[in-house]
């Protein structure tokens, strides 16, 4: 069983479109994250939710809106896609302890904006 | 969170130990050292973490110097599947899962 699963794995779309990436974890974790890995391979946190509440928002443009319908899901919706949004987006989850640095990452969703 | 410095790349022969260094000279008392790796086209994978004592698990060993200003990740018997980017991350205790990834070390294991 996949612990953290993301869909779709690949997404190619035109500038200006709106798209969503879904994430689900079956680890029973309370905290979930979205990280972005750009073309230079730098990984940066975007958002974190703990028990469906937003706890980290790293100055991400408000075109990006995370939504957590329940503790096991954290979806990422992106409006008005721009070329610079092309990246690999990783979802992750962790044990409900705010001190932990042990994250479980999904396989990533590669977004290409044309 | 403290900044880390790692060599950009390293090579290792299959079956030998791979020793990956990391400098974190500005680490503070409550910050942990975490190691992750990212195999090509996969998500990052947690390896090990420690505060001041050496740690070992089924994947690797972590040696932290007494002054905590540097550490070494040891893969005791490297295999070709260990070829990956290895990230050393220093993380404080109150930042949830906010990990600051640097450029990491590209480890290439040769046959």
Image (spheres, coloured by chain):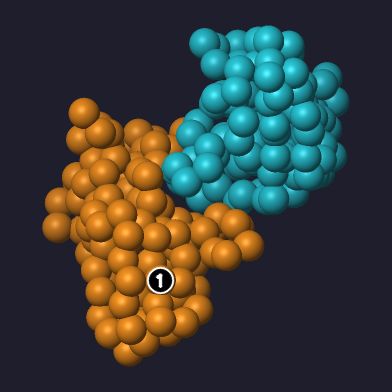
Chain colours: A orange, B cyan
Q: Badge 1 sits on which subunit?
A: A
Residue A88 picture location, percent across and down: 44, 59
**Residue most extreme to the front:** B111
Residue A83 picture location, percent across and down: 46, 82
Q: Quadrant of residue B105?
A: top right
B41 left or right of B25? left
Observer-nearest of A62 and B107:
B107
* Quadrant for the C terminus of chain B in the image: top right
**Residue most extreme to the left:** A69
A70 left or right of A38? left
Question: Up-down: is B107 above or below B100?
Answer: above
Measuring 60% from the left and 57% from the top, which residue is drawn there? A41
- Assign a secondary structure to mark 1: strand
Q: Quadrant of residue B79?
A: top right
Tell me if residue B50 can be seen.
Answer: yes
User: How crowded is the residue under tag 1: few (<14 C-alpha within 10 Å), some, or many (20+)?
Assistant: some
Residue A37 picture location, percent across and down: 52, 59
Measuring 83% from the left and 32% from the top, which residue is drawn there? B69
Report the residue marked by disc 1: A112
Residue A79 picture location, percent across and down: 30, 82
Question: Up-down: is A2 above or below B55?
Answer: below
Tell me if residue A30 can be seen.
Answer: no
Observer-nearest of B34 and B103:
B103
Measuring 63% from the left and 39% from the top, which residue is drawn there? B85
Measuring 23% from the left and 64% from the top, which residue is drawn there? A67
Q: Quadrant of residue A104?
A: top left
């Amino acid at each position: 069983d996949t612990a953290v699963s993301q869909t779709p794995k690949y997404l190619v779309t035109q500038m200006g479109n709106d798209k969503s990436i879904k994430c689900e974890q079956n680890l029973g974790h309370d905290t979930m994250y979205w990280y972005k890995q750009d073309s230079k391979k730098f990984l940066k946190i975007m958002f974190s939710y703990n028990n469906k509440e937003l706890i980290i928002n790293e100055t991400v443009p408000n075109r990006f809106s995370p939504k957590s319908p329940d503790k096991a899901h954290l979806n990422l919706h992106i409006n008005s896609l721009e070329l610079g949004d092309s990246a690999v987006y990783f979802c992750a989850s962790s044990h409900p302890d705010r001190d932990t640095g042990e994250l479980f990452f999904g396989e990533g969703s590669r977004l290409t904006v044309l | 969170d403290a900044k880390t410095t790692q060599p950009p790349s390293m090579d290792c022969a299959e079956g030998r130990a791979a020793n990956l260094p990391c400098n974190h000279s500005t680490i503070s008392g409550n910050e942990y050292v975490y190691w992750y790796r990212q195999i090509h086209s996969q998500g990052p994978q947690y390896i090990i973490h420690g505060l001041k004592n050496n740690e070992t698990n089924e994947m690797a060993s972590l040696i932290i110097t007494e002054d905590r200003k540097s550490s070494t990740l040891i893969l005791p018997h490297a295999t070709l599947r260990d070829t990956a980017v290895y990230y050393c991350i220093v993380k404080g205790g109150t930042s949830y899962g906010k990990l600051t990834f640097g450029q990491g070390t590209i480890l290439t294991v040769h046959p």
